[in-house]
C-alpha cells in the first residue's frame, strides 16, 4: 500500500501501526504515527499539531471563561 507524506505529499514507505479499532479509545482508530517522509516533515508535523492543540485548548478555555 502506498502512502503519501501528510506534509509534502511525497511517497512514504510506511506501515501503519494501529492501537485498536478506536472503539471507546482516544486513538479513534487512527494510526499511532502518521505517514511522514523524513525529519524535516516530521518537524513541520510536530509544529502543526502543537498549533492545533494550542488552538483547541484556547477555544476550550474561551468557552469555559465565557460562561
Ligand atoms: Zn514529506
Ligand atoms: Zn486505541
Image: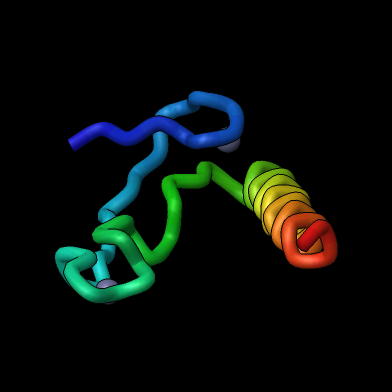
> In the figure, 14 relative to 33: above or below?
above
* Residue 42 left/right relative to 33: right
Q: How is the image coloured?
A: rainbow
Q: Is residue 43 visible?
A: no
Image quadrant occupied by the N terminus: top left
The spot of residue 64 in percent (x, y) is 75, 66
> In the figure, 24 relative to 13: above or below?
below
Residue at x 33% of width, y 49% of height: 14
Quick one: 60 or 53, which is closer to the camera?
Answer: 60
Residue sitting at the far top: 9
Quick one: 26 or 44, which is closer to the camera?
Answer: 26
The spot of residue 46 in percent (x, y) is 69, 55
* Residue 63 left/right relative to 15: right
Residue at x 69% of width, y 49% of height: 52
The spot of residue 20 in percent (x, y) is 19, 71
* Residue 59 left/right relative to 19: right
Image quadrant occupied by the C terminus: bottom right
Residue sitting at the far front: 67
The spot of residue 54 in percent (x, y) is 77, 58
* Residue 17 left/right relative to 40: left
Q: Is residue 21 visible?
A: yes
Image quarter for ligand 2: bottom left
Image quadrant in which you'd find residue 8: top right
Residue at x 25% of width, y 32% of height: 2
Residue at x 65% of width, y 48% of height: 45
Number of numbered tags placed on the structure image: 0
Quick one: 65 or 51, which is closer to the camera?
Answer: 65
Amino acid at each position: 500500500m502506498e502512502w503519501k507524506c501528510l506534509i509534502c505529499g511525497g511517497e512514504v514507505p510506511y506501515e501503519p501501526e494501529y492501537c485498536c479499532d478506536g472503539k471507546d479509545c482516544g486513538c479513534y482508530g487512527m494510526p499511532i504515527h502518521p505517514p511522514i517522509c523524513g525529519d524535516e516533515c516530521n518537524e513541520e508535523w510536530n509544529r502543526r499539531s502543537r498549533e492545533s492543540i494550542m488552538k483547541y485548548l484556547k477555544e476550550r478555555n474561551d468557552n469555559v471563561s465565557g460562561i
